[in-house]
Image: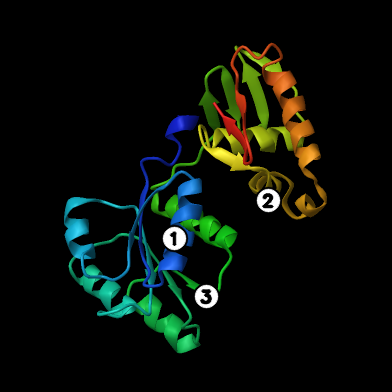
Amino acid sequence: MCYNARMQNNNIEIVVIEDEEDILELIEYHLSKEGYTVTGFLSTENVEQFLEEETPSLLLVDRNIPGTEGAEFVAHLRGMGYEIPVIFLTAKDRDSDLEEGFDAGGDDYMSKPFSPKELTLRVRALLKRSGALHKQTCVKHKQLLMNLEEKSLSIENQKIPLTNLEFNLLHTFMKHVDKSLTRDFLRDEVWGVEGENVNDNAVNVAINRLKNKIDPDNSQNYFQPVWGVGYRFN
């Protein structure tokens, strides 16, 4: 299945219920970077009304929230007939707490503190299992057509040879069209653990090499430097 890069994940809404505002903002930031639509609540107070009007694909629920405890709230939703997948986020990590959460209707469980990367991976996995996130085989943007299974790139039916690093770099940009990406973000996403040894100049060089392969005359103006930040893919 082929997706337009601008539409990737945009139709997937995730609700986050977390009473610590800084953690809520952090979760919203990382999920939004992945292209999801995110709605956050600091308590369960207005969530039911929201669910009457919207149909989110996933709930992220803290166990320790004001008013109704997280697992009790999810059990209440399940009793009302809501089948929305749920990931619990909590410091309650004893075996009895895990059992309680799953018995209440949770689908996955993450103990605090957790890494944002692990969170986004678990979110993606659960969305795939639930059918909300269909498996992508290709991504298209303007003249670019990426085949994710073959790890190949075509421009107007012509194959463009890319190294693995260049392919991953382009895929990262195509997942975040029109968003300003920092060099630190690119290092984490593209180079991974090796990114610690990659300086800003090396990131710039990699982007210039990629640009020369996919847009040598700069007619598409794909890569736009953002002063003091990094790059935006147009």
Q: Is residue 78 above or below residue 100?
A: above
Comes first in the chain, label 1 or label 3: 1
**Could you tell me the amino acid type at mark 2?**
Asp
Regarding residue 94, the answer to whether it shows in the image is yes
For numbered disc 1, what is the local secondary structure?
helix
For numbered disc 2, what is the local secondary structure?
helix
Q: Which of the pair 164/190 is nearer the observer?
A: 190
Where on the picture, by quarter, is residue 76? bottom left
Mark 2 Cα-neighbour bin, 10 Å: few <14, some 14–19, many ≥20? some
Rounded to the nearest angstrom, the CA distance separating label 2 from label 3 is 21 Å
Q: Is residue 208 above or below residue 135?
A: above
**Could you tell me the amino acid type at mark 1?**
Glu
Marking on residue 25: 1
**Could you tell me the amino acid type at mark 3?**
Lys
Q: Position of residue 121 (x, y in %)?
A: 55, 56
Comes first in the chain, label 2 or label 3: 3
Q: Position of residue 32 (x, y in %)?
A: 45, 49
Residue at x 56% of width, y 69% of height: 114
Q: Is residue 199 above or below residue 68?
A: above
Query: Extreme right residue here?
Result: 197
Mark 3 Cα-neighbour bin, 10 Å: few <14, some 14–19, many ≥20? few
Foreground mark, 1 or 3, reads 1
Rounded to the nearest angstrom, the CA distance separating label 2 from label 1 is 20 Å
Mark 1 Cα-neighbour bin, 10 Å: few <14, some 14–19, many ≥20? some
Marking on residue 188: 2
Q: How many marks?
A: 3
Foreground mark, 2 or 1, reads 1
Marking on residue 112: 3
For numbered disc 3, what is the local secondary structure?
loop
Q: Is residue 23 above or below residue 53?
A: below
